Amino acid sequence: MPSYASRPLLALLLVAASGCGGSRAAAPAPGEVDQSARYVFSLHSELAAQMGDGARTRRDGAYQWRAIDRELAERGFVVFGEPRSAEAQPEAYADSVAARVRTLLADGVRAERITVAGFQQGGLIALMVASRVTVPGVNYVVMAACPRRPTPEALRAIGRVQGRILSMFGEDDRQAGSCKRVFEQSPGPLAVREVEFAYGADAGYFFQPRRAWMSRLEDWAKDARAPLMVAPGAAAKKKQ
């Protein structure tokens, strides 16, 4: 078994034990909440829900979602990262994650120590959580999540987000792009940043725990200095 810090290992074991059904987000066991820890709900692509450890595409190869969670743990986070079941409905799952976030908050964990991170469908669920949790200091990181041409129905499903939101995507991704439209429909409060990875990056860029995007996730989750804004639509896209 790989070697982790004790808290992240405990968290991964708790997820494995309590998240077997996959229709509800895992929750900390009673008495296991550490107010000084940093927590990440890692919401994976639908590939992990459908294919588990064998998740892969012909073009991009293996989707290394377990390696991503291990890397998060090694960076000092308590990780809740088991995949959803293939039958899980995004809206219902977002309700479940939001409830788990509220549980951590009720147990005394400060909002800036909680991050909900998601890739593709997991990123859309993370945005739905951001419209359900009304504590704006919570962190969110979404990768290849927002449709390039969002329909009104898709925007309504996401809702009016709040919180500190980092959006990352690749310039060659034909499906996912900027979350500007999502941010524009929110009255705030928001602190947002967008990063577009260049040089041929697409959704497959996030299949592996690459340092470029993992370090940005870590920095966003550990640095709460970005001010929350009342006005929407303030994302500044930064090309890498």
Image (spheres, rainbow, N blue to C red):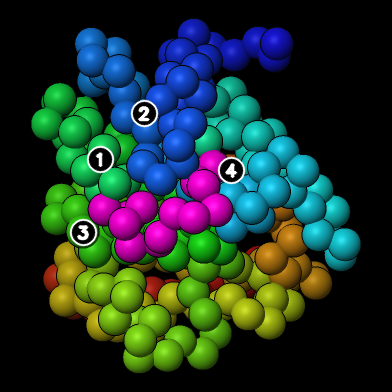
Highlighted magenta segment, given as a residue range:
83-95
Q: Quadrant of residue 196?
A: bottom right
Local packing at callout 3 (Cα closer than 10 Å; few below 14, some 14-19, many 20+) is: some
Residue 124 x %, y %: 44, 65
Residue 67 visible to an observer of this rendering = yes
Q: Name the residue tied to disc 1.
A: 101
Closer-to-camera residue (106/15): 15
**What whole-number distance in Å separates the C-alpha atoms at marks 2 and 4?**
15 Å
**What whole-number distance in Å separates the C-alpha atoms at marks 4 and 1?**
23 Å
At label 4, the amino acid type is Ser
At label 3, the amino acid type is Arg
Image quarter (top left, top right, bottom left or bottom right) of the C terminus? bottom right
Q: Is residue 223 left or right of residue 36?
A: right
Q: Name the residue tied to disc 4.
A: 215
Q: Name the residue tied to disc 3.
A: 132
Circle nearer the viewer, 2 or 4: 2
